[in-house]
Amino acid sequence: MDLTPARREITTERLLLQAGDETLAESVADFHRRNRRHFAPWDPPTADSFYTTATQAERIRLGLKAFAEGVGFRYWLSLSGEPARVIGSVHFSQVSRGAFHSCVLGYSLDELCQGRGLMHEALSAAIDEMFSPQVNLHRIQAAYRPENKRSAAVLARLGFRPEGLAKDYLFIAGAWRDHQLTALTNPMFNEPADW
């Protein structure tokens, strides 16, 4: 049963954000393979099997299950004219309701697509969906390594505010790395009738 009110596809001026299906598995695997070196300084380590079509098909299946249950929303990014070629991802995970109505944001963009405002465009649309009356989240949290100036800039431009430094937050590139914690709250949050 599909419990989520989130749209499975969102379009912007230049992008398609789609929950997708298993037919995207090879494109997702290719996205990760071609950006493996680029993402290494920012992401936790991954096994070689992560880069296979089979692993990505399973990740897509699990993502669609989370999407249907309303506990996670992953959108694969494609340029409007190339819907089958994945160039990025926006992921709202750990969706919690009750008194929290919050989630954790993660995102990634193809190295060759950076510097064009595409991630800002994707995140603006996806955050609007998460803050819509249908999804109605109150808070989105995001963390980035302080030396990741691109992430700092895109989050600041979207209105995320710094909330502190988490020491030894994630194991990345052979060591425990500090992360700047940030959050964005929904000024239009609607108090649920069934608290």
Image (cartoon, helix red, strand yellow):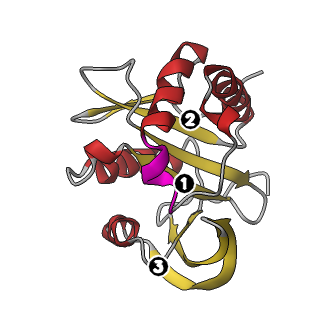
Residue 71 point in image, percent of width and height: 72, 43
Task: Quote the CA–CA distance across marks 2 and 3.
Answer: 31 Å
**Residue at screen point 51% across, 73% down:** 145
Q: Nearer the viewer, residue 83 or 131?
A: 83
CA gap between label 1 and label 3 equals 15 Å
Identify the disc placed on residue 6: 2
- Indicate the quadrant where residue 170 lies: bottom right
Task: Tell me which amino acid carries mark 3.
Answer: Pro
User: Which comes before the other along the chain, label 1 or label 3?
Assistant: 1
Where does label 3 land, which residue?
A: 146
Asked whether, in this view, residue 126 is left or right of residue 105, the answer is: left
Amino acid under label 1? Gly
Residue 162 position, x and y percent, is: 49, 82
**Front-most of 87 and 112?**
112
Q: Say which quarter of the image contains residue 45.
A: bottom right
Q: Amino acid at mark 2?
A: Ala
